[in-house]
Image (tube, rainbow, N blue to C red):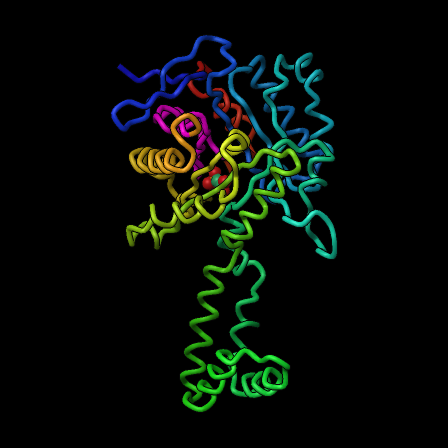
Amino acid sequence: MTTPIYRNYYRQRTANQWRKIPAEQGDPSAIRPFLAGNWKMNLIPRAGVALAARIFDLCHNIRDVDMGFAPPFTGLSTLADYIEPDFLQREYGIGRNVFLLAQDTFFESKGAFTGEISADMLAAIGVDRVIIGHSDRRANLGKYFGFSSSVARRLSKSFLTQSHLRLSQRENPDIKILSAIAHLLEESNNDVLEGLEKFLEHELNERAGESDEAIQRKVHAALANGLQVIFCCGENREARRAHETFELLERQIRIGLDGVARPTMHEIIIAYEPIWAIGEGAKPAPPEQIAEVHDFIRNLLMDLYGEQVAARVRILYGGNVKPDNICEIMQLAGVDGALVGGASLNASDFSKIIRFGLPN
Ligand code: PGA
């Protein structure tokens, strides 16, 4: 017998394990699966609307799951106009279960932050929820922007000499920095400096990105502006191999959500996205690993916020979710939905993901 896939359910905790139990049809307190498409940097505004229209066409009368679309910033306004609930209700028999998502926000509300978009700007154009801490931003900014080489180059003898002079002329120079530079200049030969430069460049290239602290500020900025948060977390391959997955996730969640009060937790959706499972060419995480991590996260939420909150927070899985694995993933007791990249750009694939468990 296959386990039923509940499209609406409650969650129950028995003997340290979570499980899904079916909800009464239409019960407003039931948990609604959430299938969210992250379009990343794809689609001009009208192509986004055309894709959404094809998806709605294939999802007539689907009301018992929530769906979300995260176009790039430039596509938000156009899509906001298109997904007006009365129109969706009339045309497709759907409506209030469609959510407009932004892919990121900045933590300050206004000012000299060229290129950034604040949470109140997003709220003002009808965004409902914002993805915060996606691994493309947590881990890949070093690769995109290449500041690793410019930082690493500072380890040359001439740069260190100039810096030492400049810093020592300050009113209150930082003694630790000064003595470290002096030490490098006195003790190290060029090979040592070159080695350090390479190390720093590699580290920044591999790891530079948004910090847990910046993510925490973004979470608070979003919540303060009435936006719900899709909080992404997940380990890279290195951490998984070193058995540091849980430690890392705990740090990401504890710091990222620090200061979010218990009553506000219903505005938070968590997305577990192991970095090694994301994108073309990668394989989704095996179901046992997804289940294990979702349980870990839920138990952590129970420690932090109590059982009632833990039973209700939606935890999505992300990383190569496709039409052929969505049912298996949604069967897992701790999984309440999916954050989908590649497959959300294809109307047929994403509508199958939204319709998981229904006959084609
Ligand atoms: P993917 O991306 O579905 O293409 O693996 C998931 C994500 O990055 O959110």
158 lies above or below 197 = below
Residue furthest to the front in view is: 172
Q: Nearer the viewer, residue 135 or 301?
A: 301
Q: Nearer the viewer, residue 329 or 212?
A: 212
Could one spot residue 235 in this view of the protein?
Answer: yes
Number of marks: 0
Image position of 228 (left or right of 1): right
155 lies above or below 293 = below
Q: Nearer the viewer, residue 330 or 360?
A: 330
Residue drawn at point x = 52 percent, y = 56 percent: 209
**Is 311 part of what is drawn in magenta?**
yes
Residue 146, image x, y percentages: 56, 64
**Is 253 part of what is drawn in magenta?**
no
Residue drawn at point x = 35 percent, y = 55 percent: 238
Residue drawn at point x = 60 percent, y = 32 percent: 69
The part of the chain drawn in magenta is 310-339
Residue furthest to the bottom in view is: 186
